[in-house]
Image (cartoon, rainbow, N blue to C red):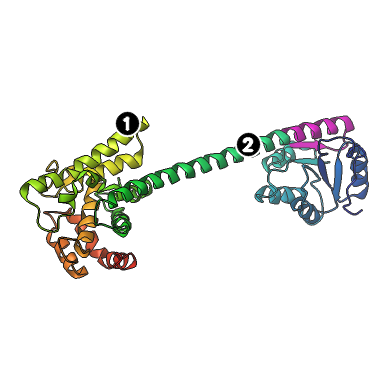
Amino acid sequence: MDNAPFVSSQATLVDKPIATILVVDDTPDNLTLMGTLLKEHYVVKVANSGEKALRIAQSAPQPDLILLDIVMPGLDGHEVCRQLKDNAATRNIPVIFLTSRSDTDDERAGLALGAVDYITKPISPPILLARVNTHLALKATADFLRDKSAYLEREVAMRTLEVQAIQDVTIMAMTSLAETRDNETGNHIRRTQLYVKALAERLRHHPRFEHILNDRMIDLLYKSAPLHDIGKIGIPDSILLKPGKLTVEEFEVMKTHTTLGRDAIEDAERRLGMRVAFLSVSKEIAYSHQEMWDGTGYPLALAGDAIPVSARLMAVADVYDALISKRVYKPAFSHDQACNTIIRGKGTHFDPDMVDAFVDLAEDFRKIAEKYPDPT
């Protein structure tokens, strides 16, 4: 017998799709019997071997349920069931073993392979139809829940992407606004992001930092880094853009950009009405990136590990980039000059372990700077 389906005469009379049953048995008489019994209610496909059953099960449209004999030449029913359940494309098709084996151990083995039911021959037609109908109903419910879950997962993923996009746009809008007040460029923002990420990746397995620098934190550092100088928007042009050295009084005003940055981000948090991780990290960086390891920085003269890790990373990245960049008050330093300055600041300006990581990454820093140069 070929595998042409028995088609229910009801198929064209109802709107609801007719379920498809695949009957697998190596005995032609059994296939004819089952086809005759089921065709009034379902679309019936048949297979006289395990190999053919697997091909039909993987072909569209897939069967909604499989009635599977156990004792067959070639692939027996147990192996067919095992392969069906190992294949992501077919594992959700319910399998009912339909067999002459009535031993309890056989039934236990069949159910352990993932079959949903075990019916022994000779069959009772009403019982068989009732159990087939029950498992089709259960499959329809499972399919609905699976589709619903997939839909919800897609919605959550979409909403997450939207939130991330809003965060990214917010950061770039705020940093772009700050750039209009300063002579630093968007490439400075890009470079410092990449420096911070490279340093964090280098230190993620360091005993002092492995409890902090996980994937989530490194991503937050990367997103938050552009806001490190957001407070400069509140500094008067006469100070911010002054080509010469600042007076003591002017420098005191310039130092307030750290506090102004923190306050701006705190205000955003209050308006939002909730704490957001990337804003918390941004606030740390904006407020503390001018602190120094030996306690001579500002605004709080923090020292050592009292300085947030995020701010210590930004301190190295920001100073290196400031050194290699041309400013209204200074020419650009060479890469080697900048590296030597960072190294001289080990244990005074910078966390010693971060300077060691910087030395290891110096060539990467140089490549980042060359890839994202300031426009001439």
- Amino acid type indicated by mark 2: Lys
> Which residue is under mark 2?
148
Q: Quadrant of residue 123?
A: top right
Across and down, in percent, residue 327 comes to 19, 61
Across and down, in percent, residue 232 comes to 22, 47
At x 73% / y 41%, what residue is drawn? 94
- From mark 1 to mark 2, how far is it between C-alphas? 36 Å
Q: Quadrant of residue 150?
A: top right
Q: Earlier in the sequence, mark 1 or mark 2?
A: 2
**Quadrant where the image shows the C terminus:** bottom left
The magenta segment is: 117-138
Q: Main secondary structure of the magenta part?
A: helix
Across and down, in percent, residue 250 comes to 10, 48
In this picture, residue 114 sits left or right of residue 272: right
The one of 51 and 74 positioned closer to us in this rendering: 51
> Which residue is under mark 1?
270
Of circles 1 and 2, the one toward us is 1
